[in-house]
Amino acid sequence: MYFFIDYMQVDDLPEVHAIDGLSFPYQWSTATYTNELNAPHHSRYVVVRMSPQTPINPDITPQSAFKRFTNRWLRPVIPLVTHRLPIVGHAGIWLSLDDGHVTTIAVHPDYRRQGIGELLMLALIDQAYALKAQQLTLEVRVSNISAQNLYVKFGFRHQGERKRYYTDNGEDASIMWTDDIHTAAFQERVHDLRQRLYQRLKTMPVVFTTPPTNRL
Ligand SMILES: CC(C)(COP(=O)(O)OP(=O)(O)OC[C@H]1O[C@@H](n2cnc3c(N)ncnc32)[C@H](O)[C@@H]1OP(=O)(O)O)[C@@H](O)C(=O)NCCC(=O)NCCS
């Protein structure tokens, strides 16, 4: 199976809602997502699509695609035809001052434990650099050990709690932060995770095929 990262589009929302419904006790509305998608200067949302075969032009190697990607992340980079491939996960980040706030991340239950959560985190970190964030933060349910493990892998640490943060059951949130994402230590950690994940997935590097908006 091949996995690809795209920017989330409004017409992806039915699939995104379906995954949210399988992942969270309550869901964001279409209006909330649409507002976020319309604010690319401070928020970015990505999806992971899957395909049983590579939908790319066979003349383009992962290496040349990666070079094009790193040269110009904002532009469509290669003639991938990933649009409309099924979505198996999504995530978002919101810039507040210089904090990159991870607002959501979810993987379809049938595709968990395959590295897609990590792929999404890597995409969010790329977006955090693009938005000029200095550090990353998020809230996570104190009972959500799977997600906490994922975040710890990416250098997040528990820094405090918000009592009764979740209104559905009154559960506390753990507030997690990374160090400065521009430090060599953080960048090395991400580099290592990226290399290991790409080897494991045997897939293309993270590739954005569409810009977040025409207005950028
Ligand atoms: C959290 C979530 C996004 C992880 O996605 P995933 O694709 O399964 O994660 P990955 O396969 O990339 O796993 C990456 C790491 O996360 C941690 N992790 C993921 N699932 C785990 C589990 N069931 N138990 C323990 N650790 C887990 C591990 O550290 C794992 O690294 P490892 O494979 O080296 O052990 C997914 O479980 C999910 O969608 N949960 C429901 C939505 C949710 O809770 N979102 C977070 C809101 S704050």
Image (spheres, rainbow, N blue to C red):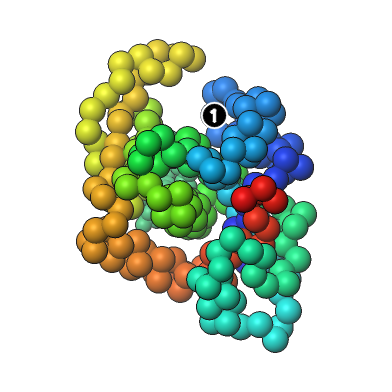
Q: Which residue is mark 1?
A: 24
Q: Position of residue 165 (x, y in %)?
A: 38, 18
Along the line of sight, which residue is nearer the eye, 142 or 158? 158
- Asked if residue 162 is positioned above or below residue 211 in the image, the reply reads above
- Asked if residue 161 is positioned above or below residue 52 in the image, the reply reads above
Label 1 SS? loop
Q: Quadrant of the N terminus?
A: bottom right
Q: Position of residue 57 (x, y in %)?
A: 73, 79
Residue count near mark 1 (Cα–Cα under 10 Å), binned few <14, some 14–19, many ≥20? few
Task: Quadrant for residue 138, please give it.
Answer: top left
Task: Quadrant for residue 65, please give it.
Answer: bottom right
Extreme front residue here? 215
Q: Position of residue 216 (x, y in %)?
A: 62, 50
Q: Amino acid at mark 1?
A: Phe
Please tell me which residue is depicted at 70% across the width and 51% down the height of the picture.
214
Q: Is residue 117 left or right of residue 176?
A: right
The answer to whether any part of residue 31 appears in the image is yes
